[in-house]
Image: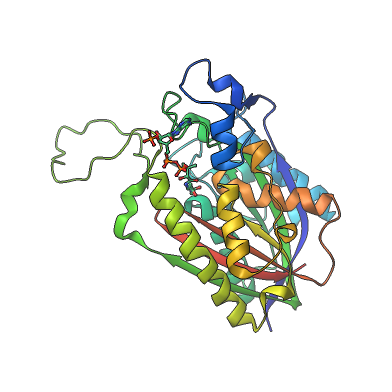
Amino acid sequence: MNGIKIKGTGRCIPERVIKNEEFTKWIDTSDEWITERTGIKERHVVTTETACDLASGACLSALENAGKTPEDVDLLIIGTISMDHVTPSLACEVQKRIGAKNAVSFDINGACAGFLFALDTAASYINTGCYKSALVVGIEVLSKIVDWTDRTTCVLFGDGAGAVYVEADETRPFYMVQGTKPDNWEVLNCKAREIESPFAIRESYPKLSDHVFMNGREVYQFAVTTVPKAIQNVLDQAHLAPSDISCYILHQANVRIIQSVAKRLGEPMEKFPVNMMRYGNMSSASMPVLLDEIHREGRLEEGKYILLSGFGAGLVYGATILKW
Ligand code: UT7
């Protein structure tokens, strides 16, 4: 049996905090609306920090937590949709910054499931025997791609980075379910920055947004129907019942989505830690930041199963079980 162990976790969060009340200075919203509809109270945003700063900080924090050095890393995978450059990948830049000179590095765009897809990829590579260790990162600087005058999106998102250091461990099996449902992918989109080519003829191309656009209701419906099914599928694959999972780490988009999933599974909310009230939706960074928080609080027990599940633009979803 192949498997992996998460040996260390880390995070890096920018200092500047925007509380819900601050938005009322420039948009028609309220702390009450944001809190009731989402569970979010505040979020952090970058001022001087770059994506590379946050991702590197999270990597060094995870390595220190694992008692490892950058040279120990064989593979560095970053899940992100808000990297500093189109090319090279953010992972290459971070590799240089932290001095992970033995690693191979690349990014994955899995939207809000980006960290999960990166972890699944790292585990799959490790299980082939190709590599023995990996740094897996979820990082977003969404503040630079949201429209700060659009109340339907800007109040939801935040910036931050989380990372895990993993190694091959045959005693800890790894199960994963992934899926993409691209039929109505436009419901959550953001156009790539581009210059106008003198040759481009794009009349038939769907009109996309220059900033993050989301049809919240559609994505909400997708999440509450797809996530419980994905979780059940990965539980079946592992021959486990919902009660065998000690902790459910879900993408932190909306506390109501998490409550709905808990109810569907018949599991108590105590097993579903939440931190979106302090960070908002950090897309691919939300799960690794939460994982780091509860790990450092001593809430994860050695040898117990944990389950991670994410969903987002694409529309994509995934569910993963591993042994802590
Ligand atoms: O991470 C990627 C995955 N993303 C998600 O999972 C997000 C999923 N969707 C959601 O979490 C929810 O749909 C939202 C939190 C985005 C929105 O909540 P909702 O209960 O679905 O609200 P809604 O979009 O149906 O809007 C209800 C009303 C609308 O007004 P009318 O048309 O009823 O007059 C909106 O214009 O709330 C209005 N509204 C706001 N009001 C005050 C929308 N945004 C705001 C706001 N402040 N910030």
Picture residue at 13% right of the left edge, 40% below the top: 201
Residue ID at (69%, 75%): 3
Q: Relative to 92, is 22 above or below?
A: above
Q: Is residue 87 left or right of residue 321?
A: left
Tell me if residue 167 comes above or below residue 114 in the rendering: below
Which of 121 and 19 lies nearest the eye of the viewer? 19
Q: Can residue 70 be seen in this view?
A: no
Asked if residue 2 shows in the view, the reply is: yes
| Coordinates of residue 303 in the picture (x, y in percent) | 82, 72
Residue 39 in the image: x percent, y percent? Answer: 61, 41
- Count the labels in the image: 0
In the rendered image, the quadrant that contains the C terminus is bottom right
Left or right? Give the position of 230 relative to 132.
Answer: left
Question: Which colour style is shown?
Answer: rainbow
Image quadrant in which you'd find residue 97: top right
Q: Quadrant of ligand 1?
A: top left
Q: Observer-nearest residue: 260 or 275? A: 260
Indicate the quadrant containing the N terminus: top left, top right, bottom left or bottom right. bottom right
The picture places residue 80, in percent across and down from the top left corner, at: 52, 46
Q: Residue at horizontal 58%, vertical 31%?
A: 32
Q: Position of residue 265 (x, y in %)?
A: 61, 69
Lateral position of residue 277 relative to residue 299, left or right: left
Residue displayed at 56% across by 49% down: 284
> Residue 60's quadrant in the figure?
top right
